[in-house]
Amino acid sequence: MKRFLSLSIALFFAIAVYGQAEKVQAMFVYNFTKYVEWPVSTRSGNFVIAVYGNSPIYEELIKVAGTKSAGNQSIEVQKVKSVGDITTQHMIFISQDKSVDLGAIIGKIGSAPSLIITEADGLISKGSAINFVIIENRQRFELKKDNVINKGLKVSSELEKFAILK
């Protein structure tokens, strides 16, 4: 398992170097489904990933959803047009153009078990659980474990090894 994750991470970095960050981000998001644990009560029906804002990651996640699953759950990707459309999705990806709404989203979902993923500087300290960053032309991600735990989720130590811990 560790070898698979290491290989996957290396592949993602290689793709990122060639300017396809949204593909790398989509694969990271998919891999997060393997290394973050949701409560038992959320493990039936579809595994729902919301994309809020304008981001090419939406199309890439649709491709992933067509060929992968999250455990025994089919992946459903939703395009969310307003904060009001956010409910209890398993993951909420907030694009850079909608970063200003992070506080409203956190307030709306409260303690619901939703993993919030962002892609703008400084959002990890404002409540995001995972934040994508580019370091030395490579796609990386910051992880704030407290923000994951506060949503009733558990993060694998394997994922922590590849994250920039905040």
Image: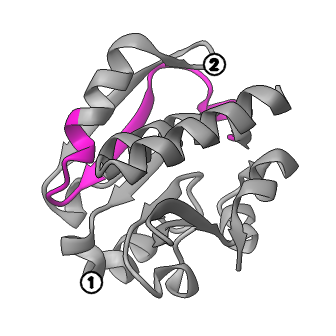
Q: Residue at x 78, y 57 (%)?
A: 160
The residue at 27%/45% (across/down) is: 57
Quadrant of the drawing holding the N terminus? top right
In the picture of the structure, the residue carrying the numbered disc 1 is: 100
Residue 78, quarter of the rendered image: top left
Q: Are marks 2 and 1 in contact (CB under 8 Å)?
A: no
Residue 55 falls left or right of residue 70: left
SS at circle 2: loop
Residue 46 among magenta residues: yes
Name the amino acid, label 2.
Answer: Gly
- Graded by Cα atoms within 10 Å as few (under 14), some (14 to 19) or many (20 or more), the crowding at tag 1 reads few
Which residue is pictured at 21% across the width and 62% down the height?
Answer: 84
Position of residue 78 relative to residue 67, above or below, is below
Would you place residue 164 above or below residue 7 in this image?
below
Q: Which residue is under mark 2?
A: 71
Q: Is residue 150 above or below residue 44?
A: below
Res 90 visible: no
Instruction: State left or right for residue 122 relative to residue 61.
Output: right
Is residue 149 shown in magenta?
no
x, y percent for residue 125: 57, 87
Of 28 and 21, the residue lying toward us: 21
Callout 1: SS: helix
Specify start and end residues of the magenta stretch as a single range.
37-59
Badge count: 2
Question: Is residue 49 rendered to the left or right of residue 6?
Answer: left
- Amino acid type for the residue under numbered disc 1: Val
Residue 51: x and y in percent read 28, 50
On the image, the x and y values in percent for residue 122 come to 47, 87
Which of these two is toward me, 12 or 1? 12
Q: Is residue 69 visible?
A: yes
Distance between the alpha carbons at the discs numbered 2 and 1: 32 Å
Residue 109 % position (x, y): 45, 63
